[in-house]
Amino acid sequence: MFLFSKSKYKKFSDNQLLDKYRSSNKQKYIAELFYRYAHLIYGVCLKFENKKSSCKDVVIIVFEKLISETKSKEIKFLKSWLYSVTRNECLQNNNKQAKSNIEDKNIVYYNSFEDNDKNISDDIVNSAVKKLKKEQRVCIELFYLNKKSYNQIVLETGYDLKSIKSYIQNGKRNLKTIIEKQINTNTIN
Amino acid sequence: MSLFKEIFSEQDNLSQQEIKNYLFNNSESESYDIEKKSLANDLNSDALEGFANNKSSLLKLDSLKKTAFKSIFKNNYIALTSFSLSIIIILTIYFYSYKQNNTSPSTVDLHKITTNNKTKTSSAANIGSIKDNLEKVNNSISKINKDPKKIIRQNNYVPLILDKRESKLEINNNNIEPKQIKNYINFGTKYIADLKIVDYSKTKRQNNLNKTSVDIWNVEPRFSNNQEQFANNNSTIKSIEYSYFEFLEEGLNLFNKKDYFSAIENFEIILQQYDNDLNATFYSGLSYYYIGDYKKAIKYFNKVISSNINVFYEEGLWYKALSYNKSNPKESVKILNQIVKENGFYSKKATQKLKNK
């Protein structure tokens, strides 16, 4: 069963698999999702969980939740759902007395623009990049325009690896808001 | 590709192999692609970070995934395994019982003779087989005829189970008195508490016992005293199930400790449920013998001797002779002579006894 899941359902998207599971109630569709995501969830656990031994349990809990909740709720963005559930589970385990306030909301990706907005010209993006803070701008330019890996950026700029990651991530987030603002002002004008 | 798509396009999930490659064999071009993927969503980026901090856990990942998979989808596994297990069990039981039926001693051949004779559907092949079988029977009977008693007394002798019809057949052919042929069933022996017993575990008999006991000491609050409780409530009488061999062992241990009365109590409970049980009859007979109640002892030994299981045949005869020793010396001499004739385990002792008289 574990081996079959590798090839058979590769063409289906996550949402299709969830729909099929909801209609047929066959666990093989969830098994395919397990094959796709188990290692990522385990990795996220390794980041957040203090006790490394309980990471396996968290993976099991997350998938059991997925099995029970897909029947009642519709999960639109599986990736973000899985991410938020695993993170909450880990944080709760770490700090059981003070329950974390994070709720299971469907987080919308910062890169998920609506389909209409996908043809945005390079000028808008370039101008938006220039509005970023210096470190974020440098890192984003080196990474996306010059296509350099983290190690190469470290050698060129002298920033340490962790901060480069966060510069790029935060830069992306800010870039998105800036571009959205620009589009809104353009449509209003 | 436009710059916007370059930055904000959706990316695939990081595969396990990609994470391994990124952390262990670092090539610049590949690592750029993986870093780009990891920036596309939180799941990828945090997973990569988690593994980067705990590289060793990446090596355990496969086994962890397998165990997690099993526990999440356990229902399927339980159903599958239980189904296959039950099939295996059924097959083994069927095979075992089939084998047992086939190996039961020489009754099949004899049965063929009688049915074939009766129905007289005599094709040439049938007649041939009947003749063969008849020869076999005659041979075996002539063997018995030479020294009948010796064969009968062997413990591991595979016996002939003879129908009444067969015994008539023999009379016609060989003029043997049917009384002399005893139908013994071959039984294994076993030792519990250093005492020989008949091994009933290989038979189809159920090996469980119910012992009823009255619970006197615990009075329920709705009754004023235990008499009232006993009168009104059947639940005070408890029936407990024991395994046969455990219960027998308890009795035999009591017997070894020379606590013959309580040993007899245990054997009685066995005899209530299996009245032909040879272990219980022989050892309760022996207990009565040691107590000095020879009349009862002789009753039990008679049962042992006449039983179609020959495990305790010699012992039964020997102790029967001993218990007749005082009350009926003539009878005891008769039995002792019989023992000497049969030339078994007790024959030397018997000859000495006879000399002393």
Image: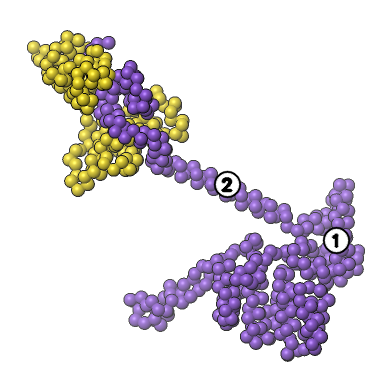
Q: Residue at x 11, y 16 (%)?
A: A131
Q: Residue at x 34, y 25 (%)?
A: B22
Count of picture labels: 2
Q: Secondary structure at mark 2?
A: helix
As drawn, the label of residue B88 is 2
Q: Secondary structure at mark 1?
A: helix
The quarter of the displayed image where residue B273 is located:
bottom right
Q: Is residue A30 left or right of residue B156?
A: left
Chain A: drawing colour:
yellow
Subunit of mark 1? Answer: B
Which class describes the residues within 10 Å of circle 1: few (<14), some (14-19), or many (20+)? few
The residue to which callout 1 is attached is B140
The quarter of the displayed image where residue B70 is located:
top left
Image position, residue A74 (x, y; %) = 28, 33
Which quadrant is the C terminus of chain A positioned in? top left
The extreme left residue here reads A189
Closer to the camera, A114 or B8?
B8
Measure the alpha-carbon separation of dots 2 and 1. Answer: 41 Å
Figure check: B175 above or below A87: below
Same-chain check, marks 2 and 1: yes
The quarter of the displayed image where residue B30 is located:
top left
Figure check: B115 above or below B2: below
Image position, residue B97 (x, y; %) = 65, 54
Callout 2, which amino acid?
Ile
Image position, residue B253 (x, y; %) = 57, 74
Chain B: drawing colour:
purple
Figure check: A176 above or below B256: above
Q: Residue at x 23, y 40 (%)?
A: A91
Q: Residue at x 81, y 81 (%)?
A: B351
As drawn, the label of residue B319 is none
Subunit of mark 2? Answer: B
Pointer 2 or 1: first along the chain: 2
